[in-house]
Image (tube, rainbow, N blue to C red):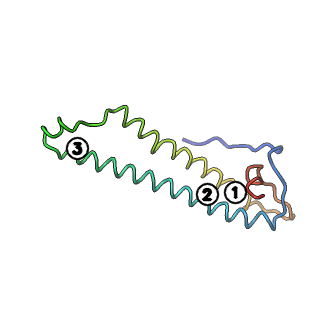
């Protein structure tokens, strides 16, 4: 599935000097990529734990399975939403921010002024 191309209105753009924006954008990208990696590790740990729980449940004897019980499917669905779906949505948004920051860096600016979004400008201050 492809994401729509987002067009940022010029009213949300702020103009800053390139000397202060370029180092900020590099650290901004690194920070966002670190956050993405942490979220993906959290999701992997959850999926690994769920797989281990499932294997342990399946390896139990029939009598033990009846006594221990299994989490209802709707509980598993809520866990999935909490531990996988929402964090991966956040990862998608962070990747879009990183792409936007990289596109700002990649633009061939002959001038000393670079246009950044108002969110990035707020973090810059």
Of pointers 3 and 1, the one earlier in the residue sequence: 3
Mark nearest the camera among 2 and 3 is 3
Q: Residue at x 84, y 55 (%)?
A: 15
Q: Residue at x 68, y 59 (%)?
A: 102
Q: Residues within 10 Å of mark 1 (few under 14, many from 20)?
A: many
On the image, the x and y values in percent for residue 35 come to 56, 57
Q: Residues within 10 Å of mark 3 (few under 14, many from 20)?
A: some
As drawn, 31 above or below 86: below
As drawn, 65 above or below 34: above
Q: How far apart in space, not on screen, are marks 2 and 3 (Cα)?
A: 38 Å
Residue highlighted by disc 3: 57
Of pointers 2 and 3, the one earlier in the residue sequence: 2
As drawn, 11 above or below 26: above
Q: Secondary structure at mark 1?
A: helix
On the image, the x and y values in percent for residue 20 come to 80, 65
On the image, the x and y values in percent for residue 72 come to 31, 32
Residue highlighted by disc 1: 101
Closest to the observer, 8 or 31: 31
Mark nearest the camera among 3 and 1 is 3
Q: How far apart in space, not on screen, are marks 3 and 1 (Cα)?
A: 46 Å
Q: How far apart in space, not on screen, are marks 1 and 2 (Cα)?
A: 10 Å
Q: Secondary structure at mark 3?
A: helix
The picture quadrant where one finds residue 101 is: bottom right
Residue highlighted by disc 2: 32
Q: Residue at x 65, y 54 (%)?
A: 99
């Amino acid at each position: 599935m492809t994401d729509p191309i987002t067009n940022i209105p010029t009213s949300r753009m702020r103009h800053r000097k390139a000397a202060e924006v370029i180092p900020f954008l590099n650290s901004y990208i690194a920070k966002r990529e670190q956050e993405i990696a942490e979220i993906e590790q959290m999701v992997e740990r959850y999926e690994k734990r769920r797989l281990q729980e499932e294997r342990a449940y399946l390896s139990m004897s029939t009598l033990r399975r009846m006594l221990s019980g299994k989490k209802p499917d709707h509980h598993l669905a809520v866990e999935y939403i909490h531990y996988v779906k929402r964090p991966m949505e956040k990862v998608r948004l962070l990747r879009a921010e990183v792409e936007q920051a990289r596109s700002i860096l990649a633009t061939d600016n002959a001038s000393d002024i670079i246009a950044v979004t108002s969110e990035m400008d707020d973090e810059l201050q």
